[in-house]
Amino acid sequence: MELASDDDGRLHLLAPGADRAADLVAAEGWALANLELLRAAAGLDGTAGEVVPRVLTEIPSRDRRLLDGRFRVDLVREVRLGGESAWCCVPLNTDEAQ
């Protein structure tokens, strides 16, 4: 499980795969209860109180059952071009640009 923030000050909880969904729900509850502390520790401005639970998957067919649920689901893949590599993240159940 990892924490991230976006430009709007929302806190994103990142979990690798659907098998971590229960952990993600527990982390979301904890993050909501401690949001003010987390925002201060991360130096986040603004008053956005949203916590966005996200499942990151490399195998979308395995985690397909989450697509219509409450989690945002993103496909993550390592992309290689020449000798360079980077990670690509593509939203699977939202139109929001990453």
Image: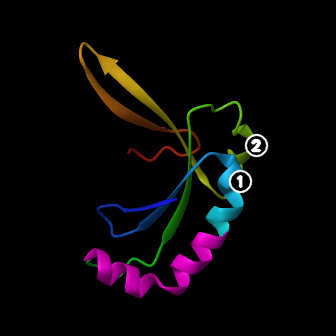
Q: Which residue is mark 2?
A: 65
Q: Which amino acid, by three-letter code, is at mark 1?
A: Gly
In this picture, residue 30 sits left or right of residue 50: right
Q: Secondary structure at mark 1?
A: loop
Q: Quadrant of residue 61?
A: top right
Q: Quadrant of the C terminus?
A: top left
Residue 37 on the magenta segment: yes
Give the image location of residue 2, x and y in percent.
46, 59
Residue 29 on the magenta segment: yes
Q: Quadrant of residue 33?
A: bottom right
**Which residue appears at 32% of the width and 66% of the height?**
8
**Which residue appears at 76% of the width and 43% of the height?**
65
Give the image location of residue 58, x and y in percent.
56, 33
Q: Is residue 55 above or below residue 78?
A: below
Q: Which residue is mark 1?
A: 69
Q: Which amino acid, by three-letter code, is at mark 2?
A: Arg
Q: Secondary structure at mark 2?
A: helix
Give the image location of residue 52, x and y in percent.
51, 63
The answer to whether the residues at label 2 and label 1 have Cβ atoms under 8 Å apart is: yes
In this picture, residue 46 sits left or right of residue 54: left
Disc ID at residue 88: none
In this picture, residue 51 sits left or right of residue 27: left
**Which residue appears at 31% of the width and 31% of the height?**
86
Give the image location of residue 40, x and y in percent.
31, 83
Q: Quadrant of residue 82?
A: top left
Neighbour tally class for label 2: few under 14, some 14-19, many 20 plus, Cα within 10 Å: few
Q: Main secondary structure of the magenta part?
A: helix
State which region is magenta.
26-44
